[in-house]
């Protein structure tokens, strides 16, 4: 209760000690002939610490990872391996889950009986990038409606025009998504929900900019502008990680995107 009330946006060391390190050291409660008696799964393991330069939670895992109890398996799931300590990575065996090919994603839609109009389907498949899980979440969150609201404003920003309403629209979409998530998930953290909503916004922006980067790959000057715009999205992520408010971060991002696409230099 104390940890939940503290509104963590990372996986607290107390949580790891209580639910992983302590139980991992205990003998299994059931005796059987299975190869693994205890299995611990840490999803979004990159959230174990805010940064790899200050990582007390990850450091607490090192000894258990190096010398786990007999028949104990610990699985760290992450899409950002670089945010884990090198000493963590060196103690793990990597198992990659590459993106599914397009035909497999289409088969997933059919199996789930998800009939979508072609425009919506193609956009969602591109956003999911071979991940059925992302596709499912994007459908549940109706992210295509975000695309419909944002794309006209993005089109103007890509022409180098500052769009005042872009930042406010991004912030409003994130806030609406986070509020709905908290209401529909018991004990959900509003701060964590804000971060998750912002991640969706960043993903949508980056995906749109990557398409333009690919489209104009032969035009070195234009391609460089879109590459810098993608860097601006990453910079906005770092601002949020530094506790800049979402409205402020989105407002600055909107200005940065227009400046980059106009060929202006951005001071990071």
Image: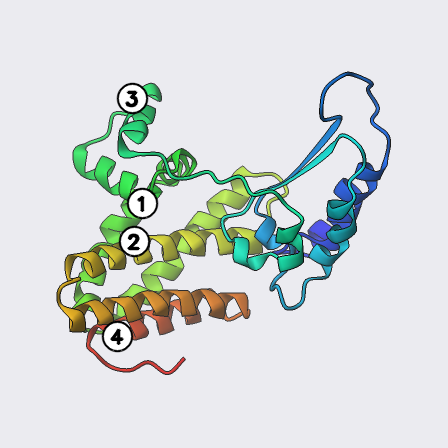
Residue reaching furthest to the right = 27
The residue positioned 68% from the left and 62% from the top of the image is 55
Q: Sequence-wise, which precedes: disc 1 or disc 2?
A: 1
Residue at the spot x=49%, y=48% of the render? 79
In the rendered image, which residue does mark 2 sit on?
207
**Foreground of the two, 268 or 94:** 94
Extreme top residue here? 32
Residue 106 location in percent, x, y? 27, 28
Name the residue carrying label 4.
Answer: 260
CA gap, disc 1 to disc 2?
7 Å
Contact between labelled residues 4 and 2, with CB atoms less than 8 Å apart: no
Q: Earlier in the sequence, mark 1 or mark 4?
A: 1
Q: Which image quadrant: the C terminus?
A: bottom left
Q: Earlier in the sequence, mark 2 or mark 4?
A: 2
Say which element carries label 3.
helix
Q: Is residue 135 above or below residue 259?
A: above
Q: Which residue is mark 3?
A: 110
| Residue at the image position 38 percent from the left and 57 percent from the top | 202
Please say if 188 is above or below 227.
above
Seen at 22% across and 38% down, the residue is: 122
């Amino acid at each position: 209760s104390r940890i939940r009330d503290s509104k963590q946006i990372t996986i607290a060391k107390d949580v790891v000690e209580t639910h992983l390190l302590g139980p991992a050291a205990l003998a299994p409660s059931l005796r059987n002939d299975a190869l693994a008696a205890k299995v611990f799964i840490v999803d979004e393991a990159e959230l174990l610490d805010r940064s790899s330069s200050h990582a007390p939670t990850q450091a607490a895992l090192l000894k258990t990872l190096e010398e786990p109890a007999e028949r104990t398996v610990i699985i760290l799931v992450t899409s950002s391996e670089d945010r884990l300590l090198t000493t963590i990575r060196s103690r793990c065996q990597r198992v990659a889950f590459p993106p599914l090919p397009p035909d497999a994603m289409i088969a997933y839609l059919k199996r789930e009986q998800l009939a979508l109009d072609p425009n919506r389907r193609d956009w969602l498949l591109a956003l999911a990038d071979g991940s059925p899980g992302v596709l499912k979440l994007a459908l549940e969150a109706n992210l295509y409606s975000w695309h419909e609201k944002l794309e006209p404003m993005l089109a103007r920003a890509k022409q180098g025009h500052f769009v005042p309403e872009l930042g406010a629209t991004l912030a409003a979409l994130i806030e609406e998504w986070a509020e709905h998530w908290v209401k529909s998930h018991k004990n959900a953290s509003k701060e964590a929900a804000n971060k998750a909503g912002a991640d969706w916004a960043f993903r949508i922006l980056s995906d749109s900019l990557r398409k333009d980067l690919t489209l104009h790959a032969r035009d070195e000057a234009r391609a460089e502008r879109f590459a810098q715009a993608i860097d601006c999205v990453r910079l906005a992520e770092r601002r949020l990680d530094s506790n800049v408010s979402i409205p402020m971060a989105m407002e600055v991002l909107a200005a940065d995107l227009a400046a980059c696409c106009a060929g202006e230099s951005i001071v990071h």
